[in-house]
Image (tube, coloured by chain):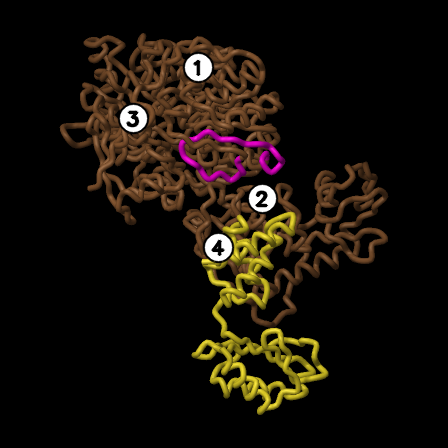
Amino acid sequence: MLSDELISKINKEKTKYPIARAAVKSALRYAQEEHGWISEEVVRDVAEVLNLETIQVFEIATFYDLFYTEPVGKYQLRVCTNVSCMLRDSDSVVSHIQKKLDIKTGETTADGKFTLFEVECLGACGGAPMMMVGNEFYENLEPDTIDSIIEKLGASE
Amino acid sequence: MATIEIDGKSLEVENGTMIIKAADEAGIYIPRFCYHEKLSIAANCRMCMVDIEKAPKPMPACATPVADGMKISTLSERAVEAQKGTMEFLLINHPLDCPICDQGGECPLQDQALGYGKDVSRFTEKKRVVEDKDIGPLIATAMTRCIHCTRCVRFGQEVAGIMEMGGTGRGEHMEITTFLGGSIDSEVSGNMIDLCPVGALTSKPYRYSARSWELQNHDAVSPHDCVGANLHIQTLRNEVKRIVPRDNSAVNECWISDRDRFGYEAVNSPERLTQPMLKSGDHWEVTDWKTAFSKVVQGLQTEINSAGPEGVAALISPLATNEEGYLFQKLLRSMDCDNIDHRLRQVDFLADSQQNLYSGAELPLEKLSTISSVLLVGSNIRKEQPLLGLKLRAASLGGSKIYAINSLDYHFNFKLDGALIVEPSTVPAALAGVALDVSRIVGTDLPEQFSAWAQLGGNRDVYSDIAEVLVADSAESLIILGDSCRQHPHYSVILAISNWIREVCGVKRIDLHEANGVGLTQNGCVPKNSENNALNLVSNPRSAYLLYGLDCVEDSIYGNVLEDSLKKANFVVSFSAFKSESMNHADVVLPITPYTECSGHFTNVEGMTQRSNAAALPRGEARPGWKVLRVLANQLSLSGFDFVDLNDVNSEMENTISEKPFEYPHDIEITLPDKHNGQDSNKLFHRIMDVPIYRVDPLVRRATALQKTADNSIRPIAGLNVEQAREFTLRDGTLMNVVTPEGNGISIQVQADNRVPVNCIYIPAGYIETAPLGVATHLTLEEV
């Protein structure tokens, strides 16, 4: 189920470390880029490529928050609700998104586009309230900026 | 060396020793959960905190190496405060269910909570709850109790060689589990129960059946394999409740296999025979010992009068103790009968021509874990001798090179540096190929009689690899012959070639036996005249048979022939602990006791004789076999059977035991391979046979939990080479007809099996269903 390109990337990672287990994190990162999340099959296949037991790969997949062991939307909206953002009313950011997308925190929209997470401080307190989508930070959020971000992402393919 | 001080006691210890080890050796107690001498250091329970002078804070004793001049206190206020603090953390989420927990009474957490815990918890928050996992029929889980010491995880990864458990999630959400809740299938998984310092992993068959402080301990030895693992059999009110390991660094260290641990379930099974029985017409009648003995005496005397002593054949299970074996053969030989054997899974007896053929291990078993190179021949050592498999794994981790010549590409728990997977008939040829390369390296000609075999073995690179490794460090090299060699139609050739290799280059050899095979061989349970070997006794029907501890169909690879001979016999006596199919062919059944109710000695493959004590009184009217044999001999008016107790038998045995334990047969007649070797016929498949781990003896076959494990299938399943399986339309559960050249056939479920080489079919023995195939080496395969 892993693409040939992915397998060769994983094999390359393997050469960087003295033991194969050390390459699991990078392998899972590439696998998640390709598949969107870490399914049972991905765990099995990564374990096979690295010649490890499945549980060794699964341990790492479940340890890190940013590896998804359940399907997630194409875009993950990670809204900070830590102190600074909370003081700048991140609660209303969360509830606005929940209402707009009709999902609860942790859920994915029916079209599979968005998943909403509440996260801890991402170090952008100067722009609170903020959220992170993919590798992008969106700061000083207000209801209409949130709407336009979501609409822009929703429209893109 | 470093000079350190622990609690004011001055100690000299090796540099690099961890504090906890130094303290243990000096008899100073440090509390711990995750540290275990045989496992790697994790330092994650934090219970072993000690106070080190000049260190800014308490340090974990398990992960802090000693340094010269170090002053350590395990009892200072700071140390005790740290230990108590850790205990408080550990107890935050640990449930207070000790009264219903099987670990209660033998629980390190319970004990240490008494020493380091507070009387009243300061936590009012809810405890976390973790879902229990079903990890198979042997281990019960209560994962809420887990304190994440990871001993079970490390055991799987390091000792057993198959990492099945792991820690998923993180922090509050961490759980010890298997991938997707799969079962634990290791053949030594039960050791995790002992390792678990809390009640998270407990024995499933033992669950809720006793409290540990009520149990009585009995020192015993496992009869299931030729290692002789030391056991504690624990009983409650005369019933065996469980078996746990007894440490013996020379044999089993602190581990035992699941077969040793859970095999006891058979002795409590409803199939136990508890009264002597006589056949009357087509049904069985319960009788008393006196009547049973007089029937046996009368029957035997009638047959001896008409057919002579040669008309009697005696077959004994390799599970019997030395004393039982000794008395059994003495009884026969006192009647001038040499027809006795225990090797019911052997077909080639040509090596018997030289007596004293005891060939066990040429080195102590504990050396296996440091040996530098190993050649495994015809052995699935991991399942045949699980504890030796662990030792080879340790050797492999230490850098030993291990090669295998097998017919099935077994999945070992150690890395193979090279493997040759060939059809069974080619195994001796492959060994001859290795011998040829050895002869080139050492410059000694390969004896003429092996050259035909070497020719058949052809030229393969792996031969010279193996030969070079064996010769390079020959004193530290080892050839291991496994069960498949013993069952091989050219066993004597394998013996002869391996002998030659060890003689020209000095490698050691271990010839693995079944169960107590070494002890029985030493004590006379082999015929003096090789003509009277088990196969001949079985295939040339005798008029009377004495069967000792056998389920005749499953315990022999020619059980089908034995069954026919029993049907033809006039008089059959079965000494047995269990009711079985073979009872149907007997005239008298005498109930004997399994090893849990019978004291005696077992000799392991190294030649170490160890005493095993009865743990319970005999059930019902059953009696220890040696007593039954003694009384029977007296009833037969044979002299020399006036033993009062086991020690009497023993001292007589010591005087008669073979004095030359390590003699190898030399002048073995070398038979040539059968003509229909090779690819002369596409229709014939080579049969690969082995006896699966939980089919080997009458005890394990009746141990219900072991029967439910993934290593066992209730009905036999045949395996076909993956490529060739495509030629048939195989689906799950596809039945096929397998027929011997003689026309005996069975229909059996066949599946594609990636361990099977081309032109071969794997069909396990040890099943009634596969017995009709006997020892046929070639089979035809037809779709149903």
Query: What element does badge 1 sit on?
Result: helix
- Choose top left, top right, bottom left or bottom right for residue B353: top left
Above or below, B203 relative to B645 = below
* Residue that numbered label 4 is attached to: A45
Inter-mark Cα distance, 2 to 4: 23 Å
Inter-mark Cα distance, 1 to 3: 22 Å
Q: Are marks 1 and 3 in contact (CB under 8 Å)?
A: no
Mark 4 vs mark 1: same chain?
no
Residue B414 lies in the magenta-colored region? yes
* Residue that numbered label 3 is attached to: B680
Inter-mark Cα distance, 2 to 3: 46 Å
Residue at 35 percent across and 28 percent down: it is B623
Question: Which kind of residue does numbered mark 3 sit on?
Answer: Asp
Which chain does tag 2 point to?
B
Question: Which kind of residue does numbered mark 1 sit on?
Answer: Ser
Q: Chain B: what color?
A: brown
Residue at 29 percent across and 26 percent down: it is B680
Query: What element does badge 3 sit on?
Result: loop
Q: Which residues are magenta?
A: B395-416
Residue B258 lies in the magenta-colored region? no
